[in-house]
Image: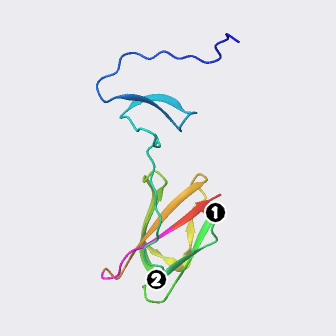
Amino acid sequence: NGFVTDSISFGALKKDESFSRCPNGTGSFEISKPTFNAENCKTTSVTYEINNDVEIFPNPANDRLYFRNSGKYSDLSDILIADIHGRIVKNVMNMSLSDGLDISQLPPGFYLIKFNHAVSSLEPSIKKFIKQ
């Protein structure tokens, strides 16, 4: 029909540079390496949990997380919580697992929680949880 509904002009690019949108097709344009029919956004994927000996509940949670361990671990643990981008958002040293953990200050989202147990010879536990 002859009408232009969307238009954008780009300046010159260096060798091996391209414009991409993140998220694909809807985000703002940025200069990046060519991705050739692939996802443009930088993402992190975790498809497993290490060491299933600590259970967290409720999940999803609102204000507080509680923990149950298999009895193989001491009740004390250093806890790190990271957001989906890998940023450490909470770090608690020598926490008693029986007390639970206040997460009321965390914004809603997906998090990983890592338990470094007081018995250093044991593997850490890593779990996923959702803050509502």
**Residue 78 screen position, x and y as percent:** 40, 71
Whole-angstrom CA distance, mark 2 to mark 1, is 21 Å
For this orientation, the residue located farthest to the bottom is: 71
Q: Which residue is mark 2?
A: 75
Residue 111 in picture, x, y percent from top left: 52, 59
Tell me which segment is drawn in magenta: 121-127
**Identity, as a three-letter code, of the amino acid under mark 1:** Asp
Instruction: State yes or no: residue 123 in magenta.
Output: yes
Establish if 4 lies above or below 121.
above
User: Residue 63 got which mark?
Assistant: 1
Q: Earlier in the sequence, mark 2 or mark 1?
A: 1
Q: Which residue is at a point 48% across and 89% down the rendered structure image?
A: 71
Residue 4 position, x and y percent, is 64, 13
The residue depicted at 65 percent of the width and 57 percent of the height is 132
Colouring chosen for the image of the structure: rainbow
**Front position in the image: 100 or 42:** 42
Q: Residue at x 47, y 43 (%)?
A: 39
